[in-house]
Every structure is written in structure tokens, then in C-alpha cells.
Image (cartoon, grey):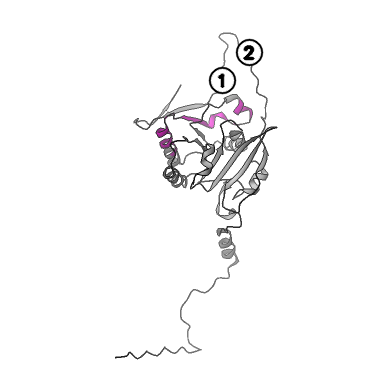
Amino acid sequence: MSRVPRPLPKVSSSGPLPEHDPPTSDPLHSSTLARSVWRGDQLGHGTVASLSSGHPRLDDELPGSGWPIAVLTELIAREPGIGELRLLVPMLRQLTREGRIVILLAPPHIPYAPALAGFGIDLDYLIVIQAPNAADRLWAVEQTLKSASFGALLAWLPADRTRPEHLRRMQLAALGARGPVFLFRTLAAQFESSPAPLRLLLLPRPNQQVSVQILKRRGPVLAMPLILDLPQPLAAVTIRPSPARGTERPARSLVTVHARQDDAGRLHRTH
């Protein structure tokens, strides 16, 4: 038995039209929507909160015009000491002068405090966390990210123990951070997949310069690397002769803590 189609209801031209959401003509709404949409052939400026890197040429190529906040940024280098820390000096100087805590987690070498002070970095707001064990180091990164009480986190990851699932967990934890998060990785990491939205390859150059190649960003591929001048100290660092016995003054030093996953206190301050 065939079904007879029901006739469509008639709508009078003078009667009310069916309800629907009318298109908005609010210019503010349109501009906000345009800023929140990122297209693959453009830098995602409108969707990224950031801090200026202090390098105008680098800011021009970074989404948000600076170091992104609340996401992972990978700094990949052949070996420590090629200028990766000096690249971040302008940002570190700004944050510590504003009284915001900067955490250095498991650096391969203890930074030289007088040199950092010579760059204008306030050592009172710089904390070094020691975590020689690879498992403790990965745990300490996650715990620090969850605290979200820092101005910037700089973490050196173990080359042979960092897996994609570790990075994904770190990226999720970083979403609540109030500052940029930098992961220092070895050269082999450039060929590995990573959830970090920003990945930079750093190579040394003569004359106090560093090459910065953007491996990944929210935007088009940048074919040529940037050659940037590394910051110079604001004040010369000098070695003074030892004072006479009994007249020594306590030197400014870095606050250092140890991270151990199996301790009840977790973090222990050293003296």
C-alpha cells in the first residue's frame, strides 16, 4: 500500500516567518571571530597569548609575536651551551624584574650566578631544581606545570627516556600555566613527533650569534633560519680578589632544591 505524501503547510507572505538565527551584523562580533580563526597560511596571532622574546625579527615569525604562554616550546640543540639560555635572557630579565619566579629544572650545568646578574636578571626570583634521575625529572616537570605558580619554566628533558606520551601529558598540564614553558631537547628530537605547538632548532654561529630554524609553528613553513645576535651583559662580570678573613660578605647565589618522587616532602631545599 503506497503512502500519500502530506501537503506542505502554506506560509502567508504577511505572516511570521519560521524562527531562525539571523546573521549578525555586529562589527565587534565579526572582528572577534576573525581574530579567533587561524588559517594554515597565516600566523596564528589572534589565538596565542605571548611574551615578547626581545628579538624583533624572531617576534615577527612567532605566533602571537612572542614566546607563547600555556603551551610547550621545544628548543632543540646539538649540545648545551651554544647560546640557548642567552636567547631567553630578555624574557628572563623582564620576568624577574617584575617579581615573577623563573624555574630552571635539571639544567646540565649549574648556571653561573654572577653572569646571570650581569645580564640584569634578578637572582632572588630564580630557582634551580636538581633532578638527576630521569624518572624524577619527568615527574618534576609535570608537578611544576600543575602548580602554575611560575613566570616561566625551563626544563631539560632526558634524551633517552622522553616518550610521546610524556610530552602529551606535559602539554595538557601546561594549559593551566601563566607563563611560557621551554623544553630543552637534544638534536635527535628534531626527527621525532611532538605535540608542542612551537619547535625551534638552535645552531651555533660565530660572532656571538645563533641560528634559529623554526621546525613547527601555527603558520606557514619558514624556509630560511634566522640569524640572531645573542644578548650581551649589561654589566661586566669581574673576579675580585678574596677579602681579608672576617670581612667576607655573603655572595648572591641561586636557590637550589632537589626533586625526588618517592619522598613525602617531594622538594627539598639544599643549603
Give the mark nearest the N terminus, 1 or 2: 2
- Mark 1 neighbour density, 10 Å: few (under 14) some (14–19) many (20 or more): few
Mark 1 — residue? 251
Can you give x and y, in whole percent of width and height, for residue 60 in the image? 65, 48
Furthest toward the left, the residue is: 1
Q: Going by the image, does 123 lie left or right of 271? A: right
* Side (left or right) of 266 relative to 113: left
Picture quarter with the N terminus: bottom left
Residue 241's tag is 2
Q: Quadrant of residue 135?
A: top left
Q: Amino acid at mark 2?
A: Pro
- Residue 31: quarter of image: bottom right
Q: Secondary structure at mark 1?
A: loop
Q: Is residue 140 magenta?
A: yes
* Amino acid marked by disc 1: Ala
Q: Nearer the viewer, residue 174 or 93?
A: 174
Residue range corresponding to the magenta coloring? 115-141
Q: Nearer the viewer, mark 1 or mark 2?
A: 2
Marks 1/2: CA distance?
13 Å
Quick one: SS at disc 2? Answer: loop
- Whether residue 12 is visible to the viewer of this picture, yes or no, is yes
Cβ–Cβ under 8 Å for marks 1 and 2? no
Q: Looking at this view, is 6 or 201 the one in front? A: 201
Which mark, residue 77?
none
Write the residue at 58% across / 43% down. Answer: 200
User: Quick one: 67 or 61, which is closer to the camera?
Assistant: 61
The image quadrant that residue 165 belongs to is top left
